[in-house]
């Protein structure tokens, strides 16, 4: 049956890992202008060091085993394979929560938050804050991908998540997500408002910039100035997104053929977003490499890139509010503005943190978990 849910286990053939190591050893490195550092893109010295560790120090099997400790499943929704983690809480009154990653992340990014979310009692917190956690892999991304047809933008993904939660027997649930996951989670509140009791977002990429004078006029002077600064910052940092939004197939050849090329491409968004480099915690290099390795081993870099193209096809406009209560957590490296967020959401909680990062589940898991708990206490 197409709606069957099948247990899943990651088991990468050793030959694929040997091939990766051999390709890393044969990397053909480009030159770099003296003193360029990160100004023109990923630093050559940084990348060489990280690639060297990837080849000789990083152990995929350690992280594969850790992922396999978490119950995993696959199912087919709307013709697409969907991989997901599903961890039920020992607490009988736990609230179901679907959490969604972004690009270039994978569900591996959630391993440090799943335990505290599902079993707060075991982590020294209030058991009344427990969740049953469902963490799907985005269509086209490692273990769900590749996609085999066009049309898998955020709206269709949100509809698939609603179907997934229905199949799992969850009628009322919360949604949480960061980066692209923030767009999917907010959209889930629009496609299934009768089922979504609340939406919590971090790295909310849908509320940082605006080129619409009418929208800017609704902001305070400080937010209007910040929105304009964000627009300039995005123009200077969005080359990767422009490529994937317009010509994803072209870059797919390079990403699928060169592991170092893929590592550099993914680092475009994993690098520190805080220009002062004083407040943002760096993501652990093993976590970054596990995400990159998962893309490489599943051959899904090009498929994942198509999500940007699908979003461009859907239109990047600001959608109507779902009416569902929404909490937003803003960490260093994020640029969401409350005034813009409130144009599309009923924002009932807004939190700002002085440390962490854009990938909060990796860079500040304890702060993210705390804010998720605090928000959902208001809607349980």
Image (tube, rainbow, N blue to C red):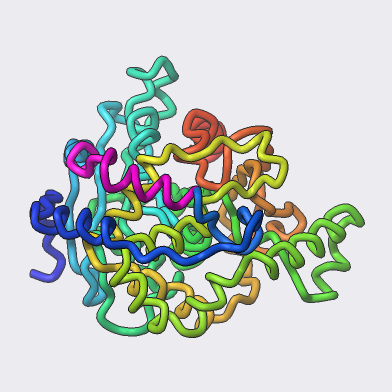
Residue depicted at x 66% and y 59%: 39
Q: In the rendered image of this protein, does residue 291 appear above or below residue 311? A: above
Main SS class of the magenta portion in the image: helix
Could you tell me how many numbered marks the image carries? 0
* 7 sits to left or right of 320: left
Q: Position of residue 46 (x, y in %)?
A: 49, 48
Quarter assignment of residue 305: bottom left
Residue depicted at x 37% and y 69%: 304
Query: Can the viewer see residue 196?
Result: yes
Q: Position of residue 37 (x, y in %)?
A: 62, 53
Task: Give whichever of 151, 242 is nearer the camera.
Answer: 242
Q: In the rendered image of this protein, does residue 148 appear above or below residue 228? A: below
Q: Seen from this angle, which residue lies furthest right?
A: 221
Q: Position of residue 299 (x, y in %)?
A: 25, 68
Task: Give whichever of 227, 164 is nearer the camera.
Answer: 227
Quarter assignment of residue 113: top left
Q: Quadrant of the N terminus?
A: bottom left
Task: Give whichever of 255, 199 is nearer the camera.
Answer: 255
* 307 sits to left or right of 329: left
Residue depicted at x 47% and y 48%: 176
Q: Is residue 63 magenta?
A: yes
Quarter assignment of residue 159: bottom left
Residue stretch in magenta:
46-64
Q: Is residue 291 magenta?
A: no
Residue depicted at x 44% and y 19%: 126
* 255 sits to left or right of 103: left
Task: Give whichever of 179, 79 is nearer the camera.
Answer: 179
Q: Position of residue 30 (x, y in %)?
A: 46, 66
């Amino acid at each position: 049956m197409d709606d069957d849910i099948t247990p899943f286990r990651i088991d990468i053939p050793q030959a694929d890992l040997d091939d990766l190591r051999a390709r890393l050893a044969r990397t053909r490195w480009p030159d770099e202008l003296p003193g360029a550092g990160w100004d023109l893109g990923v630093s050559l010295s940084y990348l060489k060091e990280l690639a060297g560790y990837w080849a000789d120090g990083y152990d995929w099997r350690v992280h594969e085993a850790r992922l396999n400790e978490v119950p995993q499943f696959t199912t087919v929704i709307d013709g697409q394979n969907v991989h997901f983690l599903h961890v039920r809480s020992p607490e009988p009154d736990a609230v179901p929560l679907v959490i969604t990653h972004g690009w270039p992340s994978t569900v591996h990014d959630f391993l440090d938050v799943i335990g505290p979310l599902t079993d707060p009692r075991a982590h020294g917190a209030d058991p009344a804050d427990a969740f049953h956690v469902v963490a799907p892999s985005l269509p086209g991304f490692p273990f769900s991908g590749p996609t085999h047809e066009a049309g898998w933008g955020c709206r269709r993904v949100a509809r698939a998540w609603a179907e997934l939660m229905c199949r799992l027997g969850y009628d009322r649930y919360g949604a949480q997500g960061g980066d692209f996951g923030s767009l999917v989670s907010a959209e889930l509140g629009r496609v299934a408002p009768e089922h979504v009791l609340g939406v919590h977002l971090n790295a909310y990429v849908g509320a940082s910039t605006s080129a619409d004078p009418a929208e800017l006029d609704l902001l305070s002077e400080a937010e209007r100035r910040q929105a304009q600064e964000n627009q300039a910052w995005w123009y200077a940092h969005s080359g990767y997104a422009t490529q994937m939004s317009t010509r994803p197939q072209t870059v797919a050849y390079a990403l699928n053929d060169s592991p170092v090329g893929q590592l550099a491409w993914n680092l475009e968004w994993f690098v520190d977003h805080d220009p002062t480099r004083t407040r943002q915690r760096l993501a652990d290099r093993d976590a970054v490499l596990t995400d990159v390795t998962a893309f490489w081993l599943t051959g899904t870099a090009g498929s994942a890139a198509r999500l940007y193209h699908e979003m461009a096809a859907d239109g990047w406009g600001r959608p109507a509010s779902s009416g569902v209560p929404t909490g937003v957590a803003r960490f260093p490296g994020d640029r969401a503005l409350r005034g813009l967020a409130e144009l599309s959401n009923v924002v009932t909680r807004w939190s700002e943190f002085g440390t962490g990062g854009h990938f909060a589940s990796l860079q500040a898991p304890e702060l993210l978990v705390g804010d998720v708990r605090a928000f959902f206490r208001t809607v349980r």
